[in-house]
Image: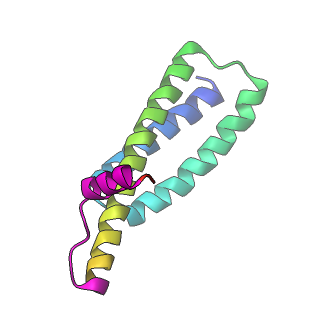
Amino acid sequence: MSRLTMLIDELTHATQQLQQMSLSDDWTLAERLQKRRAALLEQIGELAHTRTISDAQAAQLQTIRALDAQIKSRACARLQTFGDALAQLRTGSPPAPQSANRMRAAYSGR
């Protein structure tokens, strides 16, 4: 097994763990995993410049990108929830639903 394949396998495993952490809202551990993933990505990038990536490796990296998108979406939704909760604490009333904001923006010409 090549070094590049081993690194991609490690990245796949770390990304799957990150997905589990995002589902359980364990963002502290997710942050640690992101640091590990960043190091793996850097090493993969260095090796990818000198080696040809196989179709299987490219497919595995594409799967990682798809998982990343799901994780990012979950994190953004969580941030939105926290932001709404903070806004409610400040104003004492719940924020307007997203759909109402979008409708207002569409009809106000913004």
How many marks are shown on the rendered structure? Answer: 0
The residue range painted magenta reads 90-108
Which residue occupies 47% across, 61% down? Answer: 31
Quarter of the image for residue 78 reads bottom left
Most frequent secondary structure within the magenta stretch: helix
Q: Quadrant of the C terminus?
A: bottom left
Quarter of the image for residue 48 reads top right
Which residue occupies 69% across, 36% down? Answer: 45
| Residue located farthest toward the top when viewing the structure as drawn | 55
| Residue located farthest toward the front when viewing the structure as drawn | 108
Q: Position of residue 24 (x, y in %)?
A: 26, 56
Q: Position of residue 89 (x, y in %)?
A: 27, 83
Q: Is residue 42 left or right of residue 19?
A: right
Q: Is residue 57 left or right of residue 23?
A: right
Report the front residue among 7 and 69. 69
Q: Is residue 36 visible?
A: yes
Which residue occupies 47% across, 34% down? Answer: 64
Which residue occupies 25% across, 57% down? Answer: 100
Q: Is residue 107 magenta?
A: yes
Q: Position of residue 91 (x, y in %)?
A: 28, 84
